[in-house]
Image (spheres, rainbow, N blue to C red):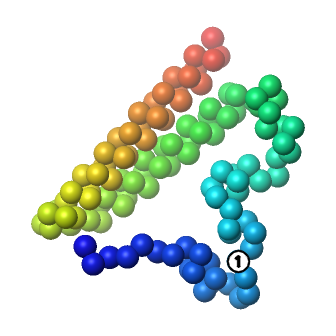
Amino acid sequence: MNKRALNFKQVSENTKEGKPSERDRRPFFAAYFDGYSQESLKPQNIDWIVFLASTYILELDAVKDFARMAKVLPEDDPNSKNLKQGILSIAKDETRHAAYLYLEQHSSHT
């Protein structure tokens, strides 16, 4: 499609003076759980209601992000149309994940 993926490492380096911070180089979940001790992340110590609720919010945000990405793709180009359909399929999958987490969270209260 004559497009190229963003190199986020390069973008980070270009937008800051000096080297990117350690936080910029870590994967999403490492950054998400930053500040928590290993002890607090053991299964027996996790507040699972908070975990499910937080993950539910992340899944809902992902639905919106994928839908927004798909919205900008043109319908008149076959490759773009196929990519758009694929991205919308991912958004639909994220919607199912969020629905599952919502149900799990609410069934845990009973």
Along the line of sight, which residue is nearer the eye, 89 or 71?
Answer: 89
The residue indicated by pointer 1 is 20
Q: Is residue 13 rendered to the left or right of residue 82? A: right
Q: Residue 34 vs residue 101: left or right?
A: right
Q: Quadrant of residue 94?
A: top left
Q: Position of residue 63 (x, y in %)?
A: 42, 47
Residue shown at the point (51%, 23%) measured from the top left: 103
Say how many tags the image has: 1
Element carrying mark 1: loop
In the displayed structure, 20 sits above or below 73; it is: below
Residue 70 sits above or below residue 7 on the image: above
* Residue type indicated by callout 1: Pro
| Placement of the N terminus among the 4 image quadrants | bottom left
Answer with the quarter of the image where residue 43 lies. top right
Q: Please provide percent x and percent y for residue 55.
A: 59, 39
Q: Position of residue 75 (x, y in %)?
A: 16, 62
Identity of the residue drawn at 15% across and 67% down = 77
